[in-house]
Image (spheres, coloured by chain):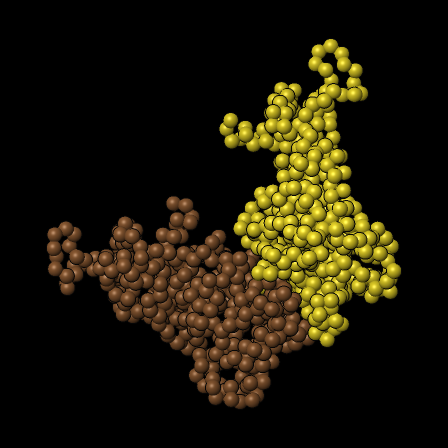
Chain colours: A yellow, B brown
Amino acid sequence: MDNRAHFLRLAHTERIVGLLRQGPVSRAELQARTGLSRATVSAIVAELRRDGVVAARPDPHERTGPGRPAELIGLADRNARTVGVAFYRDGLRVALGDALHQIVGVAERPFARSTGWAERGAVAVETLRELCVEYEVTLAGVDGVGVGVVGPVAPGRLAGRWRVAVDRLAEAVGAPVYVDNNVRLAALAETIWGAAAGHDSALYLHVGEGVGGGLVLGGRLYRGDSGAAGEFGHVTVDPDGPRCHCSRRGCLELYANVPAILSAAGRRGARARDIEAGYGLAEALADPAVDAALRRAAEHAGTVVAAALATVDVHHVVVGGLFAAAGEHVRRTFADTVRSRVLASVAERLRVVPAALGAPGGALGAVALVHHSSPLLTGYEPLRHSITERRTT
Amino acid sequence: MDNRAHFLRLAHTERIVGLLRQGPVSRAELQARTGLSRATVSAIVAELRRDGVVAARPDPHERTGPGRPAELIGLADRNARTVGVAFYRDGLRVALGDALHQIVGVAERPFARSTGWAERGAVAVETLRELCVEYEVTLAGVDGVGVGVVGPVAPGRLAGRWRVAVDRLAEAVGAPVYVDNNVRLAALAETIWGAAAGHDSALYLHVGEGVGGGLVLGGRLYRGDSGAAGEFGHVTVDPDGPRCHCSRRGCLELYANVPAILSAAGRRGARARDIEAGYGLAEALADPAVDAALRRAAEHAGTVVAAALATVDVHHVVVGGLFAAAGEHVRRTFADTVRSRVLASVAERLRVVPAALGAPGGALGAVALVHHSSPLLTGYEPLRHSITERRTT
């Protein structure tokens, strides 16, 4: 097969697999919805079956007449095989990736902030099992797990509490486990599938319950010497400001996280997570006090990102979390502040765009981390998690 | 040859050449002093002879018996062949590199600030010719020229005035010419031969007549999308501050360059370049007003570098120019400010060191750029200069 024919075939294959991802369909429907000939559909389906990617089973709603029995073509069992789990402060998300490095399904599970760490691991395992049942995969078929956690992650420095949760997950799955920071994984996902796809460099800023970030520089995901690259939340905005949990004063995170913005607007009671996810967001944004607090936060964040751009000089900035959800005018305040504080040569080519993948971004990035298939991960050594040895008592 | 074998061979080659730099030796001595086998030494010497790097001549002190005549192996004549030229505002520096990517000689030439751009190119050519005579090289033997200039350099964006000077140089040499920013070249040199040698990541800050910087991130020199990465001089320190030449207000460069520091101390007349080079520095520093202005500058610079570290998280910071020359207490003020504003995990491993190569750093980095031999330049595309076409009149 020459190159052009090869790519055409690949494109047709992707189209068919894309359709199958929405659920099993008949051959006739495959032909109708792809516009491909019966012969082409048959040849591609045959190849996909041979590779174990799709399976055919009798159509329960179709009477079998003479000739070939009516069949439904669907993605094969055990096709999904890579798992991404992103632990947040009050919940987690799980994503399943298939052998084609595509995301086939995601699930979300909230938990109380008071939930113990081992219990969080157990919730992850339970959610994963349910997702596996839904997509007809067995846990034994999983060949790798990517895990995102809150806070900086560096070699050998995974905080003890997270170790407990990740250990539980690793024991249940029995496959290699790789750990990284949630926001960095979301940045990776945005540059593979999302708002910065195809760009060599991008800065990602996430405003949620905290403020975090991620960097793709010169075609590579960048971690930094301590795993703390892109920790924009702890840049000093006001050296005489209030004390931050990091022990210093006036960090950006004190002014530009969702609870702080709601609290500045006198809405201390509103649930930050709901707002971040968009529930009650419209109502909150209609409050001029919230809007004003949000704009101030956008200005502070813009100042910090401008200093970051003086350092790394990238033209693509992706904003996630509240800044993505809150609408164009907040992003404009943010972008205008950035532009007013960077060199003209950088300002004129700057693009500020909202994240495209939303909340599941971290879990999707965790799948990508395991596949390690993106050029963005060239030279990036995923942090392999080893189950903590238990002392025998 | 696989990668590991390749690097081992490089290491052996460097060891042999390192020995030869001390003077010619016999093959037997090479084997004894390197601990390498006769076969390895022979293979490497043969390769170096083929490349014209070493030459063999009869050993005058050794009687020739039967078999191979006694020979001394030494570095070949006319070995220097790569040139680095760094243009500054009021002078230039030229460095000559040999075929082994080592610096063999440097020269310096001041010129008046009013010197025309073509004339600057002519001064560079003249200085280069003299250096070539001194080291017995012909201009025709030069196989590449690296050029450092003041200000940001990005593909296709070399300022017209610099083009005039670089054109003149390129015409005289007739070898490929590569251009980059002086400070970035100095950063490269410091991470190859200087204060950050052997480190995978480093941030370089230069305080001279302007404030510039360079970044080595994850083992690669980093330029940024516009060639403006590490432009720390234009981070806003005070949004209500005075107007900067970049058209914005309160940039770091307004507070932390040598003339500004002298002027803040009421020494407007002192020649900044002399001070930067160390002439009259001790006397100036003995002035409490200069010392106070310098400390304030160090605090401002520390604030900016702390924000940069929140972005790129590197543990090695190299300071050049005045901050290197001014002594330990200024660096301590700078380092303390940085440490007080970065995450504890970064602060505890932060090292702030003075540049080791001094003023010739830019020219040395320009040599490295041509060789393109450092792993730090992996994926770094040097900006090849094409001589500007002249209109026929």
Q: Nearer the viewer, residue A74 or B151?
A: A74
Q: Residue at x 64, y 46 (%)?
A: A177
- Place of residue A17 in the rendered image (x, y in percent of width and height, measured from the top left): 66, 31
Q: Is residue B259 above or below residue B31?
A: below
Residue B188 visible (yes or no): no
State the residue at coordinates (41%, 67%). B363
Name the quadrant of the N terminus of chain B.
top left
* Residue B100 x, y percent position in the rendering: 34, 59
- Residue B37 visible in image: yes
> Could you tell me residue A274's position as x and y percent?
83, 53
**Residue A46 horizontal/vertical position (percent):** 62, 22
Observer-nearest residue: B382 or B7?
B7
Q: Quadrant of the C terminus of chain B?
A: bottom left
Q: Is residue A87 left or right of residue B75?
A: right
Position of residue B201 relative to residue B336, above or below, is above
Q: Position of B91 compared to A292: left or right?
A: left
The image quarter in which residue A135 lies = top right
Residue appearing at x 27%, y 49% in the figure: B39
The residue drawn where x is 55% and y is 85% is B291
